[in-house]
Image (cartoon, rainbow, N blue to C red):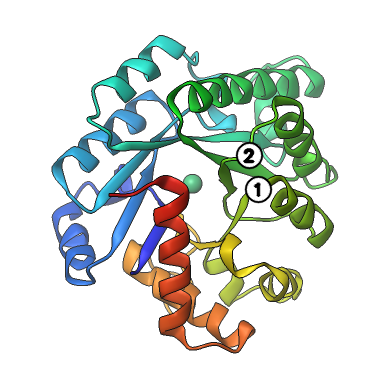
Amino acid sequence: MLVDSHAHLNFQAYKDDLSEVIGRCRQANMRVINIGAAYDTSLKAVNLALAEPSFYSAIGLHPTHVYDEEFKTEHYQDLIASSRGRVVAMGESGFDYFHIPELLEKGVKSIAEIKAKQEEVFRAHIKLARENNLALVVHGRNGKDDNTAYQDIYRVLKDENFQKGVIHCYGGNLEEAKAFVELGFYIGFTGIITFDKTGALAEIAQWIPEDKMLIETDAPYLTPEPNRGKRNEPIYVQHVAAKLSQIRNKNIDEIVEITGNNANKLFDLK
Ligand SMILES: [Zn+2]
């Protein structure tokens, strides 16, 4: 079964034609997990999941938004309680060092303060995931001259002794990927793998144990080839599956089956 394990149909990018995009997901007989990045988009993700049987939701405050609003644990707990099981994960949360310069420009005092704040919010997500037996959708992004985001994610996950989740849109190196997998985490591949010229992702995709790989779009972003330049949407996740099938020398149907089973298992999709 085709599963897009990370999309944002809850974002403004779909305000004009959401029903058509949903229609194309239905036609493809696929499952989609919509991911929140703040309270309002988390609520939208839950509402989409309540309205559409093959949609699920993750709720959380993205690390780039930790200064836009407070992460209120009770509000997210209430969302889980009222979702009738349609919240399957906490997130996306984690560390984003790429956008630190913008936060400094907005007046946050120091890099250390930003990292500490992101860590505090990340740990609050892990706590809720643990208490509600949910998976964790982890966002990581290194800075231009700071390659420590994935190390910091690993440090926190290890310290929290938390194993159930995915490192989405993976952008770390192979060694770090090995450490995450050893911890029990899944690795999410996006459309970047269809145009990545460095070969780094292909190397990881070749190595990754079959039972730990997930595919995702991160729609509306990161549109895969051959649709690059257009807005992304869940049905394009098939191009990520196609690229993985090429790299791993497998039939695309098998890749779709394997990654679908993995998503169903990790997120307990029903
Ligand atoms: Zn995302």
Q: Nearer the viewer, residue 84 or 139?
A: 84
Q: Nearer the viewer, residue 108 or 138?
A: 138
* Above or below 229: residue 124: above
Would you say residue 220 is visible in this rendering? Answer: no
Query: Is residue 208 found left or right of 218 in the rendered image?
Result: right
Could you tell me if the residues under marks 1 and 2 are in contact, i.e. CB atoms within 8 Å? yes
Query: Is residue 197 found left or right of 259 in the rendered image?
Result: right
Q: Position of residue 40 (x, y in %)?
A: 33, 26
Image point (50%, 20%), residue name: 68
Element type at marker 2? Answer: loop
Q: Position of residue 8 (x, y in %)?
A: 37, 47
Image point (48%, 77%), residue name: 255
Q: Position of residue 268 (x, y in %)?
A: 38, 46
Image point (49%, 73%), residue name: 240
Element type at marker 1? Answer: loop
Identify residue for label 1.
Answer: 184
Tell me which label, 1 or 2, sits earlier in the chain. 2
Identify residue for label 2.
Answer: 163
